[in-house]
C-alpha cells in the first residue's frame, strides 16, 4: 500500500520524459548526471562577477585620488591631507571664520582696538553643494561718525549673486540713505532701512542687464538662461551704536539679543504661514501652498526677500525694523541664517555664547559716570566704559570668545543635521571690556 503513490509518481515522470524532445532529454540527462559541475560553474561565474565589481570600485577610487591630487597641485590654497575623511570634512565645512575680510586686516584691528567691535564669524557650506550665504562686517561704516558698526548676514537661494550684491553694497546704501535723511534721530532708522532694502531689490532686478559682458557667467545663467529673476536672498542687518541696536530683517534669517541670560528676539521670521504674512499674500492675489512646508505659490519657503522678481508682489522686500536701547545687562548679539535657527533654539544659542564668555573669564565691571575717574587702572572707552580693568577680559580674549561661540554654534547645527548653509555672527555687547 505505501508503494502505490511511488509507482504513480514514477509513471507520470516516465510519461513526461517520453514527451520531451531529444535536446531537452540530453539537458535533463546532463543536469541529472553532473550536478557538481553545474554548481562549480555557477561559483566561478559569481567569483568573476565579484572580482569585476571590486576592480571597478578600485578603479573609481584611483581616479578620485588622482583628481584630488590634481586639484591640490593646481590650487595652492587647497589643504594637503592624505586622509580621505579629513578631505570630506574640509569639503562639508568650508568655513570663513575669525575676522571677516570686510572688517579690515588684523593689523588694523590691533592698531585701533578701541574703535573696532568685538565679534566672531563663521560661515559653513555644510551639506549643501553650493555656498550661497554671505556675511558683511563694516566697522565705522558711517562717514563722519565713530562707533557705528554694520553687521549683515545674507542667505541666498537659487544662486548666490543676490547675496553677494547685498554683501558688497548694503552698507554703502544704508550709509547713503542715512546721510540723505539728515537726521541723527533713532526713529529715522526705519525709513533708512526700508529705502535701503528697496534700492537693493531694484539692483537685484537689474543685475542681469547691468553687468559687464566681460564678467564670467553666473551659475544661474549657465543652468537657467534668462531666469536670473528666480534668484533672491534673505537679509538681516544690524547697526550697533553706543546707545542703540538697529535691526532690519527680510526673510527667515534672525537676530537675537542675549540680555541678562534671557534671549530677546530682535526680528521675527517671515514665513508664508505667519498669520499677517498669509493675509498680505492672499490680499495681493497670491496663495500659500503646503509643499514640504508652507511656500509662496508652492515655491518659496519665505514671504519676504530681496530679489525673486518672478514672485512679486507676493514676496516683498520691505524689512521689519526694530530699534533697541542698549543696557548694562546686554551680553551678545547673534545674527545667523536659518541653517542655524532651523535646528537650534534662541535659548540654546544664547547659552552657548554665554558659556564661551564664561570660559574666558568675567568681564570688567561696567563704568558709572561718577566713577570713571576712580578707576585709574582702566583705559577709557567712550562706547563701553573702561576698555580693560585689571582682572577683566581683554579685547583679544573677547574676540576669541566670540569666535569660539560662532564656531561652536555652526558645529552644533551640523551635528543636529542642518541641511542648509550655516552663517553665524556673534557680537560682544558686554560693558567694560
Image (cartoon, grey):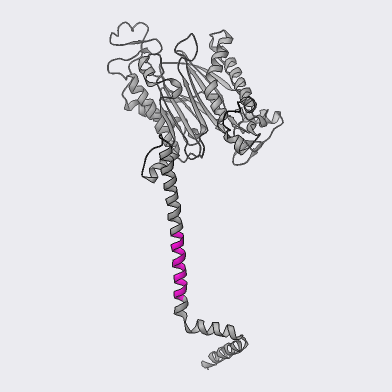
Quadrant of the frame with the C terminus = top left
- Residue drawn at point x = 65 percent, y = 31 percent: 278
Measuring from the top left, give residue 114's x and y in whole percent.
38, 14
Measuring from the top left, give residue 35's x and y in whole percent.
47, 80
Q: Is residue 193 above or below residue 336?
A: above
Q: Mark yes or no: residue 279 visible.
A: no
Q: Main secondary structure of the magenta part?
A: helix
Magenta segment: does it hold 71?
no
Q: Is residue 62 left or right of residue 286?
A: left
Measuring from the top left, give residue 147's x and y in whole percent.
44, 13
- Along the line of sight, the residue nearer the viewer: 159 or 392: 159
- Residue drawn at point x = 63 percent, y = 32 percent: 228
- Residue drawn at point x = 40 percent, y = 32 percent: 407
Magenta segment: does it hold 41?
yes
| Residue positioned most to the bottom | 1
Q: Mark yes or no: residue 208 visible.
A: yes
Q: Is residue 270 above or below residue 378?
A: below
| Residue positioned most to the right | 285
Residue interval drawn in magenta? 39-54
Amino acid at each position: 500500500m505505501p508503494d502505490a503513490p511511488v509507482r504513480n509518481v514514477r509513471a507520470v515522470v516516465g510519461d513526461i520524459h517520453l514527451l520531451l524532445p531529444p535536446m531537452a532529454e540530453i539537458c535533463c540527462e546532463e543536469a541529472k548526471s553532473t550536478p557538481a559541475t553545474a554548481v562549480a560553474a555557477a561559483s566561478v561565474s559569481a567569483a568573476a562577477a565579484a572580482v569585476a565589481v571590486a576592480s571597478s570600485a578600485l578603479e573609481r577610487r584611483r581616479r578620485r585620488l588622482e583628481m584630488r591630487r590634481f586639484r591640490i597641485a593646481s590650487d595652492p590654497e587647497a589643504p594637503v591631507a592624505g586622509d580621505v575623511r579629513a578631505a570630506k570634512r574640509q569639503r562639508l565645512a568650508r568655513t570663513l571664520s575669525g575676522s571677516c575680510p570686510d572688517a579690515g586686516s588684523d593689523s588694523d584691528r590691533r592698531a585701533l582696538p578701541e574703535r573696532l567691535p568685538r565679534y566672531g564669524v563663521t560661515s559653513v557650506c555644510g551639506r549643501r553643494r553650493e555656498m550661497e550665504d554671505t556675511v558683511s562686517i563694516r566697522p565705522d561704516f558711517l562717514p563722519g561718525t565713530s562707533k557705528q558698526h554694520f553687521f549683515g548676514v545674507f542667505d541666498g537661494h537659487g544662486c548666490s549673486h543676490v547675496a553677494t550684491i547685498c554683501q558688497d553694497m548694503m552698507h554703502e546704501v544704508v550709509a547713503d540713505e542715512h546721510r540723505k535723511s539728515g537726521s541723527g534721530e533713532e526713529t529715522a532708522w526705519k525709513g533708512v532701512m526700508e529705502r535701503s532694502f528697496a534700492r537693493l531689490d531694484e539692483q537685484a532686478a537689474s543685475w542681469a542687464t547691468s553687468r559687464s559682458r566681460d564678467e564670467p557667467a553666473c551659475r544661474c545663467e549657465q543652468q537657467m538662461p534668462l531666469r536670473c529673476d528666480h534668484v533672491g536672498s534673505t537679509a538681516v542687518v544690524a547697526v550697533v551704536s553706543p546707545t542703540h541696536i538697529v535691526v532690519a530683517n527680510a526673510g527667515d534669517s534672525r537676530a537675537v539679543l542675549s540680555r541678562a541670560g534671557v534671549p530677546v528676539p530682535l526680528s521675527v521670521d517671515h514665513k508664508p504661514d505667519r498669520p499677517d504674512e498669509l493675509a498680505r499674500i492672499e490680499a495681493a492675489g497670491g496663495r500659500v501652498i503646503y509643499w514640504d512646508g508652507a511656500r509662496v505659490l508652492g515655491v518659496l519657503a519665505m514671504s519676504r526677500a530681496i530679489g525673486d522678481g518672478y514672485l512679486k508682489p507676493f514676496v516683498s522686500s520691505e524689512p521689519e525694523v526694530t530699534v533697541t536701547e542698549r543696557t548694562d545687562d546686554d551680553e551678545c548679539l547673534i545674527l545667523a541664517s536659518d541653517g542655524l535657527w532651523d535646528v537650534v533654539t534662541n535659548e540654546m544659542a544664547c547659552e552657548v555664547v554665554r558659556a564661551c564668555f564664561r570660559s574666558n573669564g568675567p568681564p570688567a565691571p561696567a563704568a558709572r559716570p561718577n566713577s570713571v575717574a576712580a578707576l585709574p587702572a582702566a583705559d577709557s572707552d567712550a562706547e563701553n566704559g573702561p576698555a580693560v580693568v585689571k582682572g577683566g577680559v581683554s579685547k583679544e580674549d573677547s574676540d576669541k570668545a566670540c569666535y569660539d561661540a560662532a564656531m561652536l554654534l555652526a558645529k552644533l547645527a551640523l551635528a543636529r543635521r542642518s541641511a542648509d548653509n550655516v552663517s553665524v555672527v556673534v557680537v560682544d555687547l558686554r560693558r567694560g571690556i
